[in-house]
Amino acid sequence: MPTQIQFRVIIDTNVVFEGLTKQGGACALIVDAWLAGLFRPCISNALAYEYADVLSRLLSAERWQKIQPVLGKLLDHTEFVTVYFTWRPSSPDPGDEHVIDCAMNAGATVVTPNVRDFQMARQSLGLRVITPVEFAVQLAYL
């Protein structure tokens, strides 16, 4: 069994989308490491539904049908988090609020290419946020 990374992470939908639809790059490496069991991200029901919603809307029906089983495998390798508390508003983008809630309830770091929208949560809540490249570098040291 591969060694799992020790700290808890939330993978933003943008990372999942890019990792499943583009070859190469940090996001694809993250998805590959996730599938290989090198880490087990935390996820809430809202975030799981968002993954499926975004992929099903932005991909052709044929491509979504091919990627859907892969998304299922990713979700099988997650730790589901119950969101007991919310911290709103914590982002200029209301669509990021459930990511922040998941991360705060899980005590996890958010992996996202859009660190700017998480700046307010970083400052007021102490939320940890890193880019996909930063996380991929950490994965390389496993």
Image: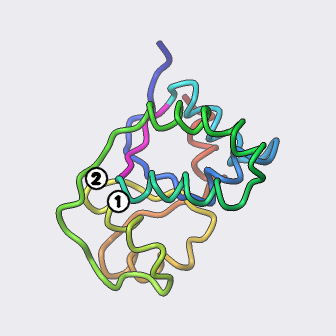
Q: Could you say whether the residue bearing mark 2 is in a helix, strand or loop?
A: helix
Between the C-alphas of marks 1 and 2, the distance is 5 Å
Q: Could you say whether the residue bearing mark 1 is in a helix, strand or loop?
A: helix
**At 24% from the left edge and 72% from the top edge, which residue is drawn?**
86
Q: Amino acid at mark 1?
A: Ala
Disc 1: CA contacts within 10 A as few (<14), some (14-19) or many (>=20): many
Nearest the eye: 89 or 2: 89
Residue lying at the far right in this picture: please name it: 23
Residue 106: numbered disc: 2
Residue 141: numbered disc: none
Residue lying at the far front in this picture: please name it: 61
Q: Quadrant of the C terminus?
A: top right
Q: Amino acid at mark 2?
A: Ala
Residue 84's place in the image compared with 86, above or below, is above
Residue 34 x %, y %? 55, 34
**At 41% from the left edge and 37% from the top edge, which residue is drawn?**
78
- 92 vs 25, left or right, is left
Residue 134's place in the image compared with 112, above or below, is above
Residue 103: numbered disc: 1
Range drawn in magenta: 39-44
Majority secondary structure of magenta residues: loop
**At 50% from the left edge and 26% from the top edge, which residue is drawn?**
37
Residue 84 x %, y %? 17, 62
Nearest the eye: 129 or 112: 112
**At 60% from the left edge and 32% from the top edge, which residue is drawn?**
69
Residue 2's place in the image compared with 82, above or below, is above
Nearest the eye: 54 or 7: 54
Residue 31 within the magenta-colored segment of the rendering:
no
